[in-house]
Image (spheres, rainbow, N blue to C red):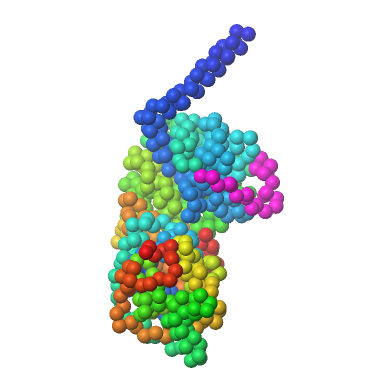
């Protein structure tokens, strides 16, 4: 009985504590501060990228997300009470972020990165909640998902969660610096970097033991490189400043941002402050494991592959050298170096082939508002020519990538450009 | 703007590929509207949608201004592959429209010498027949749209496939204009209201 009444008192105390935010609303400076922090954290979580459709209203959802299991449509997270999240409490919002459950207890499809957001603190979740309640409400009914059988059965998510979901807030590592821990919190939590940089398996899950080891992004046909291997996008050999430049402006002395990562820099990372970007850089650099010994260079060219290389050099000198230099040194940051560029030598040649076929611009950011773009060559080069020039780039100037076949080039011609 | 050159030519003059249009000398407002429409996915062409996806408005504006300011030579006019009768039909629609069917003449908005009008009505010369018919087809079938009221959608939906073929053949066979400039804003009669072109 004694214990019960103590609980009651605690509960009452909590109720009164719950009143504080309401009274804070009448206190504009504190409220403005909270909203600003919430807006910033929503940027760090890149909510806008998925919850805003092309030419759609901000945060009103409706963006189609193609998955191997069908098309999901993102939801309206504006404070409209009927079609958005206007009736949600901050508890319910935290439950969604932390545990992937709707207010009625229903399970959320894991396209929403609650596997990462579960690490977000209650305080940060509340700030994002406060910010989302302050954006203009939009009346827009959520579009039903178009999932194929059997994936349209939501109870399958229970199985997925058992295999791949570990609920729990971020636990700082006391043996590391505060900066490292801040970086880890952002990368593993709101940044949800693991959603792409950890391989997705046939069940649509990613294994914790392979965290940040890279993988092909389903349906997008871009390879998200490993963040732990210096042979891919491991940043062990990069300076902190180079990582900071890359993440925040989209270009660096080592290489430029392209493909799906351009979206992340454009909508999210460019808005983060110096301290947070540096913290992420410190953490990411630390993720990279020591370089393993170099694998042997590609086999001595046969007659066929030396023909491929001489064709490749001819195309390179004609179409590529004017920007990337005769020996692949480029003119960083606007013309990225190709010699020694990890993203060109990775085991997967998907990204190098796609850059030649589709070209691309780094994102336009405050730090680099007029990025230099690379033209597409799909319309000018045959499959053999694409294979030849990519092989040449992957194996010249000390680069140690494997040769590429015309068939690989041809397969990526039809890669859906969203 | 070297990224644009491989398809649109170093000076935006177009290339030998019949589907890649000339950009040079079109009014900046028109070019800007297209860049935004490609970026936001309303005008659908995956290579362009992909390239522009993460570029800010200010940059797109500068690209548009740049190509609008260029005046490279026009390509040789196409030698028509259609009969004289079809060509004459094309000329008649382009210059006079078809009052009975409510089709306005192209010249009433795009100018008597088809150079376009500031800020957002494009010139029609230096383009190949395949490109012109593909665009008119896109409007007819609703795959290309512009700000409402979408006057080109209205006009194109009044055209038959034969009309489109005739108009494309005639326009692509026109020689380079003596004066490649576009008309100043408000100087042409414009029988229809267009969302992209403020009056």
Within the image, what quadrant is residue A131 found in?
A: top left
Q: Quadrant of residue A76?
A: top right
Q: Residue at x 59, y 10 (%)?
A: A5
Place of residue B118 in the rendered image (x, y in percent of width and height, measured from the top left): 34, 68
x, y percent for residue A120: 49, 35
The quadrant the N terminus of chain A occupies is top right
Secondary structure character of the magenta stretch overall: loop
From the top left corner, tell me how far across and down residue B95 is, in percent.
Answer: 42, 81
Look at the image and give the residue range highlighted in magenta.
A138-158
Above-or-below relation of B12 to B29: below
Look at 58% across and 46% down and name the residue there: A141
| Residue for point 54% across, 62% down | A416
Is residue A156 in the magenta section?
yes
Residue B3 at x, y percent in the picture: 37, 67
Above or below residue A349? Residue B165 is: below
Is residue A113 among the parts visible in the rendering?
no
Front residue (pair B82, A154): B82
Residue A17 among magenta residues? no
* Residue closest to the eye, A342 or A220: A220
Left or right, residue A67 beside residue B3: right
């Amino acid at each position: 009985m004694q214990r019960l009444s103590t609980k009651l008192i605690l509960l009452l105390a909590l109720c009164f504590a719950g009143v504080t935010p309401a009274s804070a609303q009448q206190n504009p400076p504190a409220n403005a501060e909270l909203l600003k922090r919430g807006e910033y954290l929503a940027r760090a979580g890149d909510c806008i990228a998925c919850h805003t459709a092309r030419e759609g209203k901000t945060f009103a959802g409706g963006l189609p997300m193609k998955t191997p299991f069908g098309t999901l449509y993102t939801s309206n997270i504006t404070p409209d009470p009927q079609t958005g999240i206007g009736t949600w409490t901050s508890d319910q919002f935290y439950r969604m972020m932390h545990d992937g459950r709707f207010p009625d207890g229903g399970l959320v499809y894991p396209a929403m990165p609650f596997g990462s957001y579960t690490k977000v603190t209650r305080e940060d979740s509340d700030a994002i909640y406060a910010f989302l309640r302050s954006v203009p409400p939009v009346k827009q009914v959520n579009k039903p998902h178009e999932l194929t059988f059997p994936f349209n059965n939501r109870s399958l998510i229970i199985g997925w969660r058992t295999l791949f979901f570990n609920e729990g807030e971020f636990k700082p590592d006391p043996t590391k610096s505060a900066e490292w821990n801040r970086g880890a919190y952002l990368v593993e939590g709101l940044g949800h970097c693991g959603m792409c940089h950890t391989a997705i398996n046939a069940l649509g899950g990613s294994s914790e033991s392979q965290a940040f080891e890279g993988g092909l992004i389903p349906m997008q046909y871009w390879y998200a490189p490993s963040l732990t291997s210096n042979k891919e996008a491991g940043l062990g050999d990069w300076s902190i400043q180079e990582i900071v430049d890359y993440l925040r402006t989209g270009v660096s002395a080592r290489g430029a941002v392209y493909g799906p990562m351009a979206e992340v820099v454009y909508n999210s990372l460019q808005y983060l402050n110096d301290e947070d970007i540096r913290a992420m850089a410190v953490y990411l650099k630390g993720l990279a494991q020591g370089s393993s010994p170099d694998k042997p260079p590609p086999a001595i060219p046969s007659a066929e592959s030396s023909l491929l290389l001489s064709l490749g050099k001819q195309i390179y000198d004609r179409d590529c050298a004017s920007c990337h230099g005769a020996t692949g040194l480029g003119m960083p940051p606007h013309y990225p170096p190709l010699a020694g560029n990890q993203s060109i030598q990775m085991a997967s040649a998907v990204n190098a082939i796609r850059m030649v076929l589709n070209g691309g611009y780094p994102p336009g950011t405050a730090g680099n508002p007029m990025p230099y773009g690379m033209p597409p060559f799909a319309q000018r080069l045959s499959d053999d020519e694409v294979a030849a020039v990519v092989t040449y780039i992957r194996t010249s100037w000390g680069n140690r990538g494997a040769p590429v076949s015309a068939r690989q080039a041809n397969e990526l011609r039809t890669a859906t450009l969203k | 703007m070297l990224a644009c050159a491989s398809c649109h030519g170093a000076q935006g003059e177009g290339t030998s590929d019949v589907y890649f249009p000339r950009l040079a000398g079109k009014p900046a407002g028109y070019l800007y509207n297209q860049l935004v429409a490609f970026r936001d996915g309303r005008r659908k062409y995956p290579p362009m949608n992909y390239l522009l996806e993460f570029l800010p408005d200010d940059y797109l504006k500068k690209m548009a201004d740049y190509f609008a300011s260029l005046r490279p030579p026009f390509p040789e006019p196409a030698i028509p592959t259609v009969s004289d009768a079809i060509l004459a039909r094309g000329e008649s629609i382009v210059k006079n429209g078809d009052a009975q069917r409510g089709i306005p003449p192209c010249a009433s908005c795009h100018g008597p010498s088809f150079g376009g009008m500031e800020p957002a009505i494009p010139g029609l010369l230096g383009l190949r027949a395949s490109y012109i018919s593909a665009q008119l087809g896109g409007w007819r079938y609703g795959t290309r749209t512009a700000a409402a009221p979408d006057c080109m959608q209205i006009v194109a939906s009044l055209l038959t496939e034969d009309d489109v073929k005739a108009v494309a053949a005639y326009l692509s066979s026109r020689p380079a204009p003596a004066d490649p400039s576009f008309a100043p804003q408000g100087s042409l009669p414009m029988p229809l209201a267009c969302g992209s072109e403020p009056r």
